[in-house]
Image: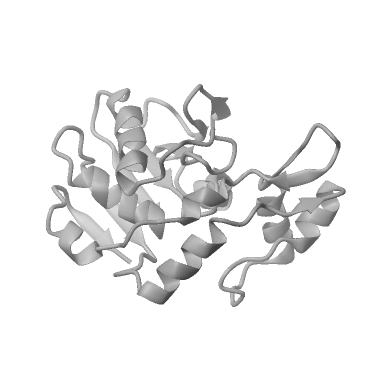
C-alpha cells in the first residue's frame, strides 16, 4: 500500500492506500493532527484512498490569520475539488463539524459523511475557557523528550496506551532555532465560534452517519 506525506504551501497531509480507490478524507479534532489517524488507517487503506490533512494552524500545516469553521471548510473543499470524482469524509469532533460544513455546500459536497464524537452545542463557560486559553503562549521545553513526557490528552479519561500517546505527541512539537521545543499548534485556533450542530445538520446534502 502507498503511504506518503505531503507539505504544500497551504496544507500538510498524510495519505495511505491506492490513489485509484475511492477517496476518503479524514478530519481530525481541535488541537490534534493527522497522525491521530495512523492506526485507524490500517483498517481502511485496502478499500479507500485515505487523505488526512493537518487543518490550518494544526500539525505541520501553516498558521493562518483566521480560524473560522468556514475557513477550514473552504480548505477541505479546495482539496476535494482536485479529486474530480466522488469522495467521502470521516470527521472526529471538530473535524465532524467541518465535514458537515463541507457537506452543506452544494459546490463540492461529499457523497457520504461520518461524524464521530461531535459536540451538539458550545456552552458559554466552555467557549470562554477556550478563548482564554487562546491568549496563552505555548510552553517551551529543553528537549523533545521533555515535551513528549508532559503531553496529556483531554479529557484525561481514555484507553490509549502510553506508546500510542507518545507516538501522537512526537508530532505535536517542533525544534526552535535556539534548540528548545514548543507546540506546532497555533493556540489562536482555540478561539472557536459557537457550535450549532442541529441547525447545520439540516443543511447537509449527503447521507450522514453520526456516531
What's the image's color scheme? one colour
Image vertical order of residue 129 relative to residue 201, above or below? below
Q: How many numbered marks have been drawn onto this rendered protein structure? A: 0
Residue 22 visible here: no
- Where residue 74 sits, quadrant-wise, is top left
The one nearer the camera, 144 or 206, is: 144
The one nearer the camera, 174 or 208, is: 174
Q: Residue at the spot x=73%, y=65% of the render? A: 162
Residue 133 in percent (x, y) is at 56, 62
Residue 200 visible here: yes
Residue 164 in percent (x, y) is at 68, 58
The one nearer the camera, 181 or 80, is: 181
Q: Residue at the spot x=69%, y=66% of the render? A: 161
Residue 95 in percent (x, y) is at 39, 52
194 vs 61, left or right, is left
- Where residue 115 sits, quadrant-wise, is bottom left
Q: Quadrant of the C terminus?
A: bottom left
Q: Residue at the spot x=82%, y=51% of the render? A: 141
Q: Residue at the spot x=73%, y=56% of the render? A: 166
Q: Quadrant of the N terminus?
A: top right
Image vertical order of residue 53 relative to residue 172, above or below? above
Residue 206 in percent (x, y) is at 16, 48
Amino acid at each position: 500500500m502507498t503511504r506518503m506525506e505531503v507539505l504544500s504551501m497551504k496544507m500538510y497531509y498524510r495519505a495511505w492506500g491506492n490513489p485509484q480507490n475511492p477517496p476518503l478524507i479524514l478530519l481530525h479534532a481541535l488541537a490534534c493532527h493527522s497522525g491521530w489517524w495512523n492506526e485507524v488507517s490500517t483498517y481502511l487503506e485496502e478499500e479507500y484512498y485515505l487523505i488526512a490533512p493537518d487543518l490550518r494552524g494544526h500539525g505541520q500545516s501553516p498558521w493562518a490569520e483566521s480560524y473560522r469553521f468556514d475557513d477550514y471548510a473552504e480548505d477541505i473543499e479546495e482539496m476535494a475539488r482536485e479529486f474530480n470524482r466522488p469522495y467521502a469524509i470521516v470527521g472526529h469532533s471538530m473535524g465532524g463539524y467541518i465535514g458537515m460544513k463541507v457537506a452543506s455546500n452544494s459546490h463540492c459536497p461529499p457523497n457520504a459523511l461520518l461524524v464521530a464524537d461531535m459536540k451538539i452545542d458550545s456552552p458559554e463557560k466552555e467557549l470562554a475557557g477556550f478563548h482564554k486559553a487562546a491568549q496563552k503562549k505555548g510552553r517551551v521545553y529543553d528537549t523533545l523528550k521533555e515535551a513528549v513526557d508532559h503531553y496529556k490528552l483531554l479529557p484525561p479519561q481514555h484507553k490509549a496506551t502510553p506508546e500510542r500517546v507518545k507516538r501522537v505527541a512526537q508530532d505535536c512539537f517542533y525544534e526552535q532555532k535556539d534548540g528548545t521545543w514548543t507546540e506546532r499548534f497555533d493556540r489562536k485556533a482555540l478561539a472557536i465560534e459557537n457550535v450549532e450542530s442541529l441547525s447545520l445538520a439540516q443543511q447537509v446534502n449527503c447521507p450522514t452517519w453520526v456516531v
